[in-house]
Image: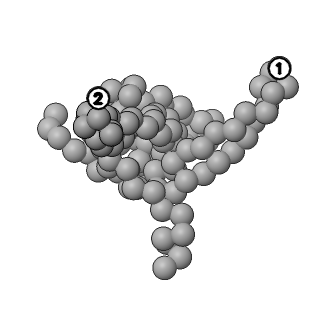
Amino acid sequence: MNTLRNKVQLIGNLGNNPEIITLESGKKLAKFSIATNESYKNSQGEKITDTQWHNIVAWNKTAEIIEKYLEKGNEVVIEGKLTSRSYETSEGEKRYITEVVCNELLMLGSK
């Protein structure tokens, strides 16, 4: 049951081509965002689509697969955990970011 404590599953489309970073240690990091859409009808009966953007990071072998096969617009299933961190800008402002650290990736659609 512990694996359910911080688990995120998303199905969405890449909003941009993944950014691939190779660290000095040789490890790879992939960063990208995906959009998920939810549709509903408002009180006037109009269909409304709500789009949410999610920041995704992936490491090592998963990052290598992302680098090789994924590009803007691809539909994917992401499974991972939600993480939050903060950093300080050069102007001294504190910024916060929430990301999904991808553990599992499934590519949907055809190439």
Of all residues shown, which one is farthest toward the right? 92
Q: Compare residues 42 and 90 and report the one nearer the observer.
A: 42
Estimate the x, y position of residue 70 in percent, counting from the top left. Answer: 31, 34
Alpha carbon distance from label 1 to label 2: 34 Å
Residue 73, disc: 2
Of all residues shown, which one is farthest toward the bottom? 1
Of all residues shown, which one is farthest toward the front? 44
Instruction: Determine whether, in the image, residue 106 is placed left or right of residue 87.
Output: left
Per the image, the residue denoted by label 1 is 91
Estimate the x, y position of residue 38 in percent, counting from the top left. Answer: 33, 43
Q: Indicate whether 81 appears above or below 63.
A: below
Visible residue check, residue 13: no
Visible residue check, residue 100: yes
**Earlier residue among tags 1 and 2:** 2
Of all residues shown, which one is farthest toward the left? 110
Instruction: Please state which amino acid type lies under the numbered disc 1.
Output: Glu
Residue 81, disc: none
Q: Compare residues 50 and 23 and report the one nearer the observer.
A: 50
Q: Quadrant of residue 13?
A: top left
Q: Residue at x 37, y 50 (%)?
A: 10
Instruction: Please state which amino acid type lies under the numbered disc 2.
Output: Gly
Q: Residue at x 48, y 79 (%)?
A: 1
Q: Compare residues 38 and 80 and report the one nearer the observer.
A: 38
